[in-house]
Every structure is written in structure tokens, then in C-alpha cells.
Image (spheres, coloured by chain):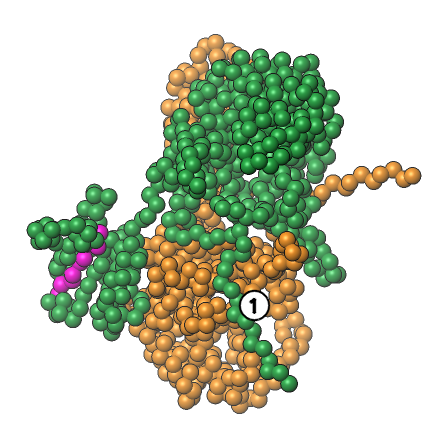
Chain colours: A orange, B green
Amino acid sequence: MAKPKKQPRPKAITPKGFRDYFGSEVTQRTEMLRTIAGVYHRYGFDALESSAVETVEALGKFLPDVDRPNDGVFAWQEADDEGQGDWMALRYDLTAPLARVYAQHRNDLPTPYRRYAMGPVWRNEKPGPGRFRQFYQCDADTVGTASMAADAEICAMLSDTLETVGIPRGDYLVRVNNRKVLNGVLETMGLAEDADARDAVLRTIDKFDKVGEQGVRELLTQGRLDASGAYIDGVGLSQDQADPVVAFLTSKAGDTAATLSNLRVAVGDSRIGAEGIAELEQIAALLDAGGYGPDRIEIDPSVVRGLGYYTGPVYEAELTFEIFDEKGRKRQFGSVAGGGRYDDLVKRFTGQEVPATGISIGVDRLLAALREKGRIQAVEHGPVVVTVMDRDRMADYQAMVAELRNAGIRAEVYLGNPKNFGNQLKYADKRNSPIAVIEGGDEKAKGIVQIKDLILGAKIAESATLEEWKELPSQFEVPRGDLVAKVREILATQDGQG
Amino acid sequence: MAKPKKQPRPKAITPKGFRDYFGSEVTQRTEMLRTIAGVYHRYGFDALESSAVETVEALGKFLPDVDRPNDGVFAWQEADDEGQGDWMALRYDLTAPLARVYAQHRNDLPTPYRRYAMGPVWRNEKPGPGRFRQFYQCDADTVGTASMAADAEICAMLSDTLETVGIPRGDYLVRVNNRKVLNGVLETMGLAEDADARDAVLRTIDKFDKVGEQGVRELLTQGRLDASGAYIDGVGLSQDQADPVVAFLTSKAGDTAATLSNLRVAVGDSRIGAEGIAELEQIAALLDAGGYGPDRIEIDPSVVRGLGYYTGPVYEAELTFEIFDEKGRKRQFGSVAGGGRYDDLVKRFTGQEVPATGISIGVDRLLAALREKGRIQAVEHGPVVVTVMDRDRMADYQAMVAELRNAGIRAEVYLGNPKNFGNQLKYADKRNSPIAVIEGGDEKAKGIVQIKDLILGAKIAESATLEEWKELPSQFEVPRGDLVAKVREILATQDGQG
């Protein structure tokens, strides 16, 4: 008989497209979420946390791309007592769950209901560089009002939020468009009822930033050779049909009034188009009265937004400064937030019209932008490390860290094998510790401790002359009773230099 | 041909066993997580956020109960390009993912690695009252050291954390036991190698709190009639075999030394038992030196902990005050945190010994306890509501809320249909607003606003005499320019009374 096979060891890897976040990556995100929640809260929005798991039918199918399994969500079938249960899925955004929550609890919620939500969402997409299958969103939505004042408020709040987290005016722009205007354009082209053509036109418009006016015209008609030499099929419209789309796309002018006037030409006598333009006009007037000029928020007909559930105004916040991409090429940082009005999402459940509008901030991208601009420190100091010179006196060392902590100083005792002292200093180095504390038998007998300034020590080791070395001692001998005071003094000096 | 069936509307319900959290339920939890993270951080623990999704093989099978589908996790099979991919699952705790993270990143992490993590975990269990399939945990673990100083530190930190979030000394107890001691007892019984018998004995010990010494003895031997009249099968041990278990369970004495001495009798000459007792002795000595006496942390042999991966010391934090359960009966609040040493979890991946120990706080239960004791306000005030008297002057009202927000006051404009003013006040009431602001055409012409103190108004409406009504006006007419100052004044008065 064959020997029983040994179970292979499990592989220690994150599933494909997922990642781990360490230390300041986590705390900086937490801090940013807290800051954003503060702005949302001041605007009167209430917190909501729905579960990560929803029934598939409640989530609906609104994700943009189609080249994915399971419609882009992670889903599974419940096993219940009788056998097969409901299909469940991880939420792919925070908007679809909000529609479910509002429909479920509408009798207990105020109307309009302003709510904010933050947390991870999951997309069953092909992972790519910098593109993960779990990421954070931070949303604010107003449910139960068709008033454009709600849309204007959302845009103003988005602008305030970006400035509050550290993106100065001039480095971002909130761009506003309206799905109804585009629908008006499609109506004039006779494509209003043709969902496939509509989607193809939408996808083409979304490429305007990349391919420009001529490129869009080619993609809408016969097709186009792209930069790599590949031929991209066109939508197959005639040049006449492409005209209003191009007119729409290029209608952005020097000021809002001129842009709106160009849009009026593009939508011709479409009723829905005119409605969309009137809505944009209302939003612009309210924002203008609030002092949110085109340096912060502007009407821009090239904004599309991929999600299928938008019905009116759509918004997108872009960071306008340039960064270098992974290939070293300069490019604009791009979108960090987006949203819009989705008047039919709640109706799916209730059958009644419940207008709603909101935004979603891509927190991880926003963090990346702030790091890119050096507005968030990438590396933070670790704790003070109390070394262990005498394994039997662990209680003494724990008393030291307790004293330091009680004084509000982050501190820890070395818990590895203390035999090799060099390992303890290497550990402190890996922890990015500012200070190491040493108390061997001699020190104990004399009632003193050694305190090593590791930041200064590293600097000296790097560059100091012998002269400076003598003048800048990086190790201090102080009475045991002065431990906390001396540590505090060194930390203050380090902060002053840092 | 039959008419095409209309798609039925999706049901607006949370999946079974899941729930939504609103307003202060969310913000209070966020605040508690922040407070706990503060303590963990001061102790030198670094933040880690792993993804919610892991491969099933990485998670392993360590959940206690067995009467569940899919071994208690939510799992699904990935669809990859070639057809069928890996099995993935939602994490059921934060410990199994930590073992994976440490094994994966061990070359970049310090050793020992102290980390904290917080977030939801998912269990595919039968939901029950107050028992949900998604709940929050807040963990701290030290990986890479076998030192009992790490276990003592974790217990001390748990004690500090409970006091910091608002559980005073005397209202909680951290109880410490050691799996090795129990294994020693099983060794003396000749059951060390019999996993089934071991698990049965463990489960029986876990019922000690409920059934007492005699009950445990019956359950270990021939079985027992429970309170409901049902007969519970016994494990089938002899009375002689049951003796050491009962001796072990009842070995808790007036002080640590006496408890340890009783345990020495219970484990006889078992080597592993003696090792466990020596470890408990070390932990007790370190805690004692740090001032963590038996009023906060005590050795208690009845602590079991369900998870299968523990190998040494185990901890449990209990709240000792009494509450009334859903049936109106008095009972102790019970466990809010637990943990222990799990020296083999990382080894599953790497083949090398990597000792580790840690705790997990059940944040939702801890919050429930604080609400129960009135230490967290259940209801919070909503925003100041600026009402809309004239739909065309929305910009004026938005200017008011902007002024209030810029002064740090939470404020919002009414965004529903403004026609019926009563609805606006009903809305403010539902929002629990402290103040409503009113500016109609007359007020606008006179350059004034009306400010309604809604808290005082509600009090007066409830109980005031006509006399008091006159003396305590709840509505004030102030110049438009004094809006912010007057609102601030009223809020200060309300805070003073609240």
C-alpha cells in the first residue's frame, strides 16, 4: 500500500488582486476617512454602515464593463436547511446598498435622507498595476429630493472636502455634466431608444480626453488607427450623426453661460436635452451664489461616468496637477471622486419614484495623490524601544515602558531573544525607533539608564566628522528617575529637526 | 403566446443574519475603535489591514462548532480564464489572516512583530437574537516570540484598554488559563492522544459556569437531565477519570499561589502540565510586578476558548456587572474579549516554529455593555435646520448654512418640498435638530431671522404652564448678521442643560 501523502502546506499569499496595508498606510487612511466624515457630518449627513454582503438581486447589475465573470461581483449561493438558498454577493459600491437600505427603512428615516458611508467595496475585475479588487470608498448621498439644490450641495461639499484633506484650490476641479443633455443629443440623432448604440457612444465620449475631437469623430464613424498601430472599430455612425456628438463634446466655452448656450445648439429641440440644460443652469447659479466659481466647479460636457444607474447630473473630481506614471511619463493625476443623480435605484424596490443623488470619493487614490505631492509623510517614527540586558529583570523593563506610556510616549520592551544585543539595535532600526533605552547590571547598580538618540546617531554615523561626533553626543546617561523627562526632551529635539 | 412575465421587484432586505447600523451606532463604534487603536499604538503595536478575502487554504479550519455548512465560512470558487480557480472565503477572524501575512512578509517585518487590526469578520452561522453573521473585531498580537512577557503584556494591555474605553476597575476581569495544563490533566487520564475525547472534555469544561461541579461530573460520565427535562448524553468517562478534570476545574483558590498549587495536584506528574503551570506562574509574576493584581487579572482554570488553534496561555475578559437579558432575567454581561497563544499557526505555512500570542476584542458587545451602563449617550442631537420659506431664495438659505458650518456648527438646509411648513418642522423633529432657522419674506425685508430653540420648545410643550411659557421664550428674532452668534448661544445653553 502506498504511503499516505502528506498534506501540502498552504501557500502564504494574498488572493490575486488583493493586498495588505501596513502601519502608516492604514493609519493615514483612517485619519483621512475621519477628516472626510467630519466635513460630511458638518453638512448634516448621518453615518450609515450596511453589511458588506447583500443579496445579488438587491445589488442589481449596474457595473460598467462586461468582460468579467459573474458580472464583476464576488457571489456565492447560500446553503440553507432545505438545500439551496439565495445568491449573495459582496457589495461593489456603497450606492446600491443605500438604495436597498432606504427602501427597507424608509418609514423610519427622515426625508430627505442625507447619509454618508465609508468602507471597502469589492470588484471581481482583472487586477492590474495599482488596481485592486478591494478598495475603499467614502460616499455621501441625499435620498428623497429631486431638487437641484441637493446636487449643488453635493458638489460644494466635494470641493470643501478636497480642500480640507489637503488638496489646495487650483490643484483640483469638480466637473459637472448631465446625462439628460447627452440623451437629448442622442434623441436628435434618432438613437434615444437604441441602448447598444447609446452605450457605444457613451464609451466613445469617455475617450475624448485621450483621443481628442478628431479621434472621437473617427471612433463614432468608420474607426481609427490607434497610437500602437492597432485598428479600433468605429461605432458606424454617419458623419452627420457624429456632428451633434462632437458639438456636444466641444461645447465647453470660457464661461458657464457660453457653455450652456453651445449645449442648447447641440440638443436642438429635444425636450429632455432642454431639461438637462435647465438643471445645469440651476446648479451653476446656486454654486455661483455660494462662491463656488469655475476655479473649483465647472460645467464640462465631456464628463461621462461609467455606472449604468445615473439619470441626471453627473460629477467628477479631478486632480489637475501632473505626476509621473510608472513608465516615467508625465500625466495628469486624474479622477479621485465621482457621482451623480440616480432617480430610479430605489424605485427598483418600491415601485415609487425616489430621487437621489450623491458622490463617492476614491480614498486610496486620494491618499496616493497626497503622498505623491509630499503632503503626507511616507514614513513615521516607531516606538521608543527599551532593550533587555538581563532576561530576569523583565519586570524592571516593563516598568520603564509603563512609565513612558503613562506619559503618553509610545514605547515597547524588546521581546525577542535578548542574548545578542546587536539584534536588539537592529530591531530598533527596523522599527524606525527614535530612541533606545539601556539598563544593564552596572547601570542598575548605579541607578542610571543609558538613552540612545537613534535618529541623531544615524545622522552622525552617516556624515559627522570626529569633531562633530564629540560635540553631538547621541547617547546620554541619566538617573533612572529622569528617564521620562530625558526621553521627552530628545523626542522634542527630533521633532524640531524633523 | 404567453405575455412575457414582468421581472418581480427585488426584495429590500438585508440578507438573513446581517444588519444595518445607523448614525450614532456607527460613529460610536468608530470612536471606540479609535480609542482602542490609541492604546495598542502606545504599546508599540503597528496597524495592519489585510483584505477581507483570503484563499480557503490560507484560512484553515479552526472554527469551534461543527453544525454549520461550509465549515462556518462564506466561500466561493473563483472563475478564472481556464475555468475553475481557487476557493476564496471571507475571513472569520483576524488571527488566521495575520498568520498568512506574517508568513508572506516575514523577511520585511520586524521580529517580534506587534500588530493590531480592526474590522468586520464573517461567520456563516445560524443567526440568532443579537448574533450576527458580520461583526467587528479589534485584535492585537505579537508574533515571533515564545516569551511569557508577551502574554503578560497582552493581558495588561487588555486591562488598560477596557479601562480606557470606560469600563472601570471592578466591572471587568481578565481571566487567564493555559491549554497545556488541561493537556496535562488529559495526559494523566490517558486521553492525551484521543482528539475526540479531548474535544468532548473541552466542551464539557466550557459548561462549568452554567452547570457547576456536579453537572460537569455528570456530563463527563453517564450524562445529565438538563433544566428543560431533556437528557444530555455524557462523555462516558469513569468517575475516576472525571476526578482530575473536576479537580482542575475547581482549583481556583483565594490567591494565585494557592491556585497554582491546586493545579499541580491536578496534573500529577505530567511534563506538559508542569510546563503550563510554570508559564502561568511567570505571567502572574510579571503582572504582579506591573501592578496588575487579581482585581484586574487572575488565573482561572475554567477558561476554555473555543478556537482550535490555541497551544498555551488563553485569556478571556469578562464584564462582571449584571444586566437584564431579553427575558428580563438578571445575568452577568459576560465575555467581551478573548485570545491566547497559538504557536503553530504560522508553521502551517512555513514549516518553521513561529510562536505567537494575541487577543481579540468583540467591539460590538463592548459597545452594547457601555450603552447598557449608560456610559454612551444613545441619542445625539442632529444638525441645525435652516427652513425654506421661499423656494426661489435657496441661495440665501445655503449662505446661512455655509456661515454656520464655517463656524464649526453642524447645519443643513431643508431639501424636501418646502410647500408645507409643518413638514419642515416634522423633519427637524425626526432629525432630532436642536434649532430651526426661519427667514420668510417679511423677515428678509426687515433684515432679521427667527431662531427656534427646538429642545426648549419640546420641553415647554410637554410641561410648561402659561406663566413659564411667557418667561421662557423658545423663539428669538435677531438681526440676520447675528445668526451665528445667537445659534451658538442657544447651543451652549442646551449643552449646559443636557
**Vertical placement of A443 versus B69: above or below?**
above
Please provide percent x and percent y for residue A444.
48, 12
On screen, residue B36 above or below A171: above
Image mark 1: chain: A
Which residue is outermost to the front? Answer: B229
**Span shown in magenta:** B447-456
Question: Is residue A444 visible to us here?
Answer: yes
Against A96, residue B140 (above or below) is above
From what the image shows, is residue B115 above or below residue A435?
A: below
- Asked whether A14 or A478 is in front, the reply is A14
> In the rendered view, does B281 fall on the left or right side of B474?
right
Q: Amino acid at mark 1?
A: Lys
Question: Residue A197 magenta-drawn?
Answer: no
Within-10-Å neighbours for mark 1: few <14, some 14–19, many 20+: some
The quadrant the N terminus of chain A occupies is top right
Query: Disc count in the image?
Result: 1
Which percent across, then down, holds residue A397? Answer: 49, 20
Residue at the far top: name it.
A445
Residue that mark 1 sits on: A61
The residue at 9%/53% (across/down) is B466
Residue B112 appears in the picture as rendered: no
Residue at image coords 80%, 38%: A6
A56 vs B4, nearest the viewer: B4
Q: Residue at x 24, y 53 (%)?
A: B434
- Give residue A122's position: percent from left, percent from top: 56, 57
Q: Which element type, helix, strand or loop, lies under badge 1? A: loop
Q: Residue at x 44, y 41 (%)?
A: B327
* The C terminus of chain A: image quadrant: top left
- The image quarter in which residue B96 lies: top right
